Amino acid sequence: MSISREDIEKVAVLARIKVDDEQVSALEKDLGNILDLVDQLSAADTDSVEPMAHPLDAVQRLRPDEVTETNQREAFQAIAPATEDGLYLVPKVIE
Amino acid sequence: MHNKSVAELSRELESGKISSVELTQQFLDRLKQEDGKYNSFITITEERALADAKTADEMRAAGKATAWTGVPFAHKDIFCTNGVRTTCGSKMLENFVPPYDATVTERFRQAGAVCLGKTNMDEFAMGSSNESSHFGAVTNPWGLASGEKRVPGGSSGGSAAAVAARLVPAATATDTGGSIRQPAALCGVTGLKPTYGRVSRYGMIAFASSLDQGGTMARTAEDNALMLNVMAGFDPKDSTSIDREVPDYTATLNEPLKGLKIGLPKEYFTDQLSPAMEEQVRNAVKEYEKLGATVKEVSLPNAKLAIAAYYVIAPAEASANLSRFDGVRYGYRCEDPKDLMDMYTRTRAEGFGTEVKRRILVGTYALSHGYYDAYYLKAQKVRRLIQQDFANAFKEVDVLMSPTSPSPAFIQGEKTNDPVTMYLEDIFTIAINLAGLPAMSVPAGFVDGLPVGLQIIGDYFAEARLLNAAHQFQQVTDWHQREPK
């Protein structure tokens, strides 16, 4: 199965990854090959099969709604690219 | 000392013949001198290791020593280490210093083990050759003497190469599609991927959350058991951790194998396997027969779909997990972003390597509108078919055996231009992750001077049985003791 340049450009926007024209060409080939590999799945008869999410069919545990963690904002923000007054700095979002 | 196992080093320390500070210094000196050939470490933590060794000696003097107290080892650079940078092999995390420890890291610390540093790996654990690391490829110690630079396998290639080269007696590793077993096989060491949920994933940087599992790598099965004793167990911080009693994995190593029922999946002995590889694996199975095991052929009819299902599920989960790397809270951020979108897209374009981006894009595509049912849901259904095949097989036999990889270590660069060829490296290991089962790779011979791995697959939580089977094999063979020249 092939994947078009337009599809790759669309997916790259969804994934928030900048790609240039040259990369799109390489991805066209590589992703096409990967999707060919994946297309083997269509041969499998899965009509009455339940999808499997967890190997042991475990479900998400819930914990009591209690405060257990201490605030470590300074430690966490010490490794951020840019912060000010306890806030994370990013380029202007609203003009 | 560098040739000794964890169990032997532990006895040396216990007898007082050597202190942990002396032992750690010896290993550090050797590591710094030798690793230029292999590039198996990303970070060496000399000062911290010596401080930990001193603490270990004090622990021992106070009568509080465990089997691990004062023994040097290494962590794959995917496990967060408080205060020590953790890169996951990526430019994205080149300067990331975690403010907390992974549960696995914390457990080894509590046992008094001495971590010498962080081992190299494929970027975000995506690879089978350790060539996708931002910190350079790792070279397999095997084959170097004849001037060939071969891959150690991946993604835990740094851990495997370091253990094979006797830089450390043991190292942690992780396995999403074969990332412990395949490098263990290619480097001639022993590795174990436990049952999904047996070892906590907390602080283990996520690739594909429903498949990722932390595990062990060392030269002997006994040392793998000692590692698992530290690592296994319930962790409330990991929502998929299983709350189930942990046995002493060393206690059953010496059980006789008489009556052990071995199944050989016929789908794993096909023409994908070279006759020379097959011969080594069949010889290993014969050793088991001499030890009293019985052998029969079994079938895993859906195993052929495992790679296809994996390359939907793993990229889909990766695309979701890796969305956290956005240049805001930690990790790499591009220079001079002109707006928020520019910051996201350039940060991720510059911070991730080719293979990681490829998988994020495949995963995003598979999860996108109009494709979810055809890809992700279909793959999850095939996953159940694969699991049922194993369940049926384990009604008849105790363990399954197969080759770990289709061929021995290949030359660096040989498969880098064709992702799909590289993916086929994991053809015998990937189905086990989809089913969530435990499996080992055990050194079982050589082809053209390069190690061959025997894969032993068990039913859920059968780690003790796998370790027992591997240990008994290692009592009658010496493949695991062979040293690369």
Image: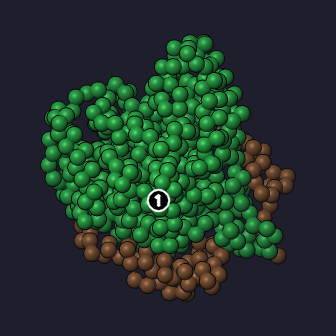
Q: Which chain is green?
A: B
In the image, B224 versus B201, the foreground residue is: B224
Q: Is residue A39 visible?
A: yes
Residue under label 1, please give it: B128
Q: Nearer the viewer, residue B40 or A50?
A: B40
Q: Is residue B379 left or right of residue B330?
A: left
- Residue at image point 38% right, 56% down: B408
Please tell me which residue is depicted at 43% across the width and 37% down the height of the picture: B219
- In the figure, the brown chain has which letter? A
Q: Amino acid at mark 1?
A: Ser
Q: Is residue B338 above or below residue B452?
A: below
Which picture quadrant has residue B83?
Answer: top right
Q: How many marks?
A: 1
Q: Residue furthest right?
A: A85
Q: Nearer the viewer, residue B470 or B411?
A: B411
Query: x, y (%) of residue B464?
Result: 33, 34
Residue B145's spot in the image, x, y percent?
49, 50
Residue B317 in percent (x, y) is at 49, 62
Quarter of the rendering containing residue B388: bottom left
Position of B482 compared to B52: left or right? left
